[in-house]
Image (cartoon, rainbow, N blue to C red):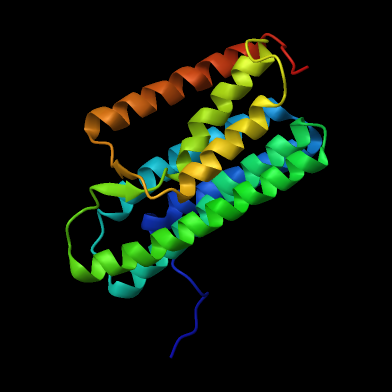
């Protein structure tokens, strides 16, 4: 039997892999204090996550490929929308101990949410071929829109205190675990999210080019 690298490397997982790599680059930027670059990396990871499922659905995958897709997507999401935002908030808050605890609990909430989603998704796929129509709990990917928005408002002194960042993590972390049923966005909803992301990214690139820096 011919040996090969572990894992799957066809086009259905490329965006998921790219999203994780963008997120890791964002982590490196946070460590350097380059917060604009880190937020842009988070948004790029969010874009990859938005389309990876649609790309994967274009291929007739076997059971193992589907299960691998579920696992790799959630592992990537943990890095992108758990660890990166948690570290971002901890660093921008001056490495405050209390904020560090909040960030750690936020990452833990994301981990639990994603693992629970995996269990439900595997069970659902074994039961039906229909596409998912709703989620339980707030999807972790919402941080890719909300954290950049919060950072923009903070950098322009609309939000005047760094405490806005840990508050955001507390609210979202709780939302990850609450059993709230949220309908999956349709075409109109996805277009609205994409437009919001494009506007955020365009505004951030413009501001970045103007030489603004965080306080």
- Would residue 20 be seen by someone viewing this image from the given angle? yes
> Residue at point 47% right, 62% down?
115
Q: Number of callouts in the render?
A: 0
Where residue 78 sits: x, y (%)? 55, 53
| Residue 21 appears in the picture as rendered | no
Q: Where 58 falls versus 190 (above or below)?
A: below
Horizontal arrangement in the rendering, residue 213 relative to residue 21 (left or right): right
Taking depth in this image into account, of 50 and 106 the one nearest to the observer is 106
- The quarter of the picture where the C terminus appears is top right
Judge from the rendering whether residue 73 lies leftward or rightward of residue 60; answer left or right.
right
Between 78 and 195, the one nearer to me in the picture: 78
Q: In which quarter of the image is residue 182?
A: top left
| Image location (x, y in percent) of residue 86 | 66, 43
Instruction: Give the answer, above or below, for where 4 lies relative to 31.
Output: below
Residue 173 percent location from the top left of the image? 55, 44
Question: Which image quarter: residue 209?
Answer: top right
**Residue sitting at x 66%, y 10%:** 156
């Amino acid at each position: 039997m011919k040996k090969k690298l572990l894992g799957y490397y066809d086009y259905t997982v490329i965006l998921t892999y790219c999203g994780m790599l963008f997120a890791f680059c964002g982590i490196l930027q946070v460590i350097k204090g380059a917060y604009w670059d880190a937020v842009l990396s988070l948004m790029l990871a969010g874009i990859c996550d938005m389309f990876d499922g649609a790309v994967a659905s274009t291929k007739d995958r076997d059971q193992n490929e589907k299960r691998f897709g579920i696992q790799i997507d959630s592992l990537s999401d943990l890095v992108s929308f758990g660890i990166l935002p948690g570290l971002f908030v901890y660093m921008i808050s001056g490495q405050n101990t209390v904020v560090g605890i909040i960030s750690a609990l936020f990452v833990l909430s994301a981990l639990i949410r994603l693992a629970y989603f995996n269990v439900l998704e595997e069970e659902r796929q074994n039961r039906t071929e229909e596409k998912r129509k709703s989620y339980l709990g707030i999807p972790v990917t919402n941080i890719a829109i909300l954290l950049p928005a919060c950072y923009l408002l903070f950098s322009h002194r609309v939000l005047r205190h760094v405490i806005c960042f840990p508050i955001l993590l507390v609210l979202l972390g709780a939302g990850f675990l609450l059993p709230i049923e949220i309908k999956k966005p349709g075409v109109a909803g996805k277009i609205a999210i994409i437009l919001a992301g494009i506007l955020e990214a365009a505004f951030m690139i413009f501001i970045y080019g103007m030489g603004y820096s965080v306080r």
